[in-house]
Amino acid sequence: MIEHIVLFKWKEDASADAIALAMNGLLAMKDQIPEILELSCGENFSQRSQGFQHGLRVQLLDCDALSTYADHPVHQEVIEKYIKPILGDIIAVDYEV
């Protein structure tokens, strides 16, 4: 099993509406990309986040599923349409469980 974790830091001028659209776009991937076993995302509440405001967790079966997910047209559309326009910084990690 693979855990794919992404932390997002938004541009200072990112609107609440744009952030909500990004989160909804990420959540919608669960029903559109078959390789996703579990997906959750939400707003950070920790004071230890170094300014990262939202997180995404995606569980996938294996590295092949991770690669398919990464290249999937729905995933790419969410990135281009909702994430990139408001993205300030990003961190991603992948690990086996």
Image: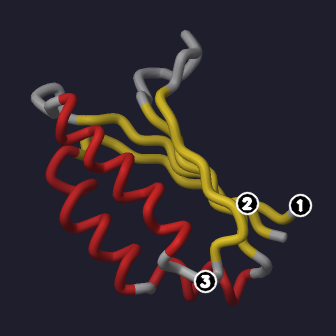
Residue type (three-letter) at the residue carrying disc 2 = Glu
The residue that label 3 is drawn on is 34
Q: Secondary structure at mark 3?
A: loop
Which residue is at 62% across, 57% downward? 39
Locate residue 70 relative to residue 21 in the image: left or right: right
The crowding category of the residue bearing disc 3, from other C-alpha atoms within 10 Å (few below 14, some 14 to 19, many at least 20), is few
Locate residue 85 relative to residue 87 in the image: left or right: left
- State how the image is colored: secondary structure
Q: Quadrant of the C terminus?
A: bottom right
Which residue is at 18% across, 36% downward? 17
The residue that label 2 is drawn on is 3
The crowding category of the residue bearing disc 1, from other C-alpha atoms within 10 Å (few below 14, some 14 to 19, many at least 20), is few
Residue type (three-letter) at the residue carrying disc 3 = Pro
The percent coordinates of residue 4 (x first, y second) are 64, 60
Q: Quadrant of residue 26?
A: bottom left
Locate residue 28 relative to residue 35 in the image: left or right: left
Nearer-N-terminus badge (1/3): 3
The percent coordinates of residue 50 (x first, y second) are 48, 21
State the separation of the CA atoms marked 2 and 3: 16 Å
The crowding category of the residue bearing disc 2, from other C-alpha atoms within 10 Å (few below 14, some 14 to 19, many at least 20), is many
Foreground pick, 78 / 48: 78
Q: Which mark is residue 97?
A: 1
Nearer-N-terminus badge (2/3): 2
